[in-house]
Image: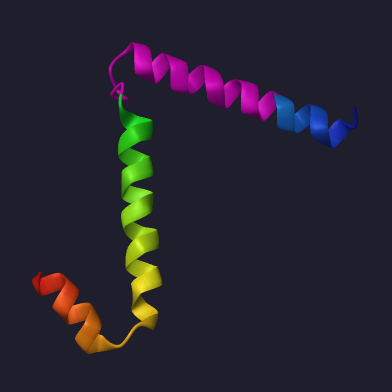
Amino acid sequence: MTEGSAALDDVLERLQQRIERRRADGTYPDDLEVELAAHYERIVNARSSLGRDPASRLGERID
């Protein structure tokens, strides 16, 4: 294991501990990952639709 990977492992461990503490104290809701994944999907879908013609995008939004 290199010094850099050991430092990264330490940072990831501390981050995981912080997340677990915040979940335990109610800062993060239980379904946070699900909500973030859904939000990410909305962003990706919105960005991928930008390449289509405006009339097509408008029609989809109206529907």
Colour mode of the rendering: rainbow
- Residue 39 position within the rendered picture, expressed as x and y whole percent measured from the top left: 32, 48
- Residue 18 position within the rendered picture, expressed as x and y whole percent measured from the top left: 48, 21
- Residue 17 position within the rendered picture, expressed as x and y whole percent measured from the top left: 53, 17
Looking at the rendering, which quadrant does residue 47 occupy?
Answer: bottom left
33 within the magenta span: no
Magenta segment's dominant SS is: helix
Would residue 10 be found to the left or right of residue 27 on screen? right
Question: Which sits in the foreground, 51 or 25?
Answer: 51
Looking at the rendering, which quadrant does residue 59 occupy?
Answer: bottom left
Write the residue at 31% across / 21% down: 30
Question: Which sits in the foreground, 36 or 63?
Answer: 63
Check the image and name the residue furthest to the top.
24
Would residue 38 be found to the left or right of residue 59 on screen? right
Q: How many marks?
A: 0
21 within the magenta span: yes
Q: Is residue 36 above or below residue 2?
A: below
Question: Which sits in the foreground, 47 or 11?
Answer: 47
Figure quadrant of the N terminus: top right
Check the image and name the residue furthest to the right.
2
Question: Which sits in the foreground, 1 or 44?
Answer: 44
Q: Is residue 15 above or below residue 53?
A: above
Query: Which stretch did the figure color magenta?
Result: 10-30
Would residue 9 be found to the left or right of residue 57 on screen? right
Write the residue at 32% across / 45% down: 38
Figure quadrant of the C terminus: bottom left
Q: Is residue 58 above or below residue 46?
A: below
Write the residue at 73% across / 33% down: 8
Write the residue at 33% across / 31% down: 32
Would residue 16 be found to the left or right of residue 24 on screen? right
- Residue 42 position within the rendered picture, expressed as x and y whole percent measured from the top left: 31, 56
Looking at the rendering, which quadrant does residue 50 occupy?
Answer: bottom left
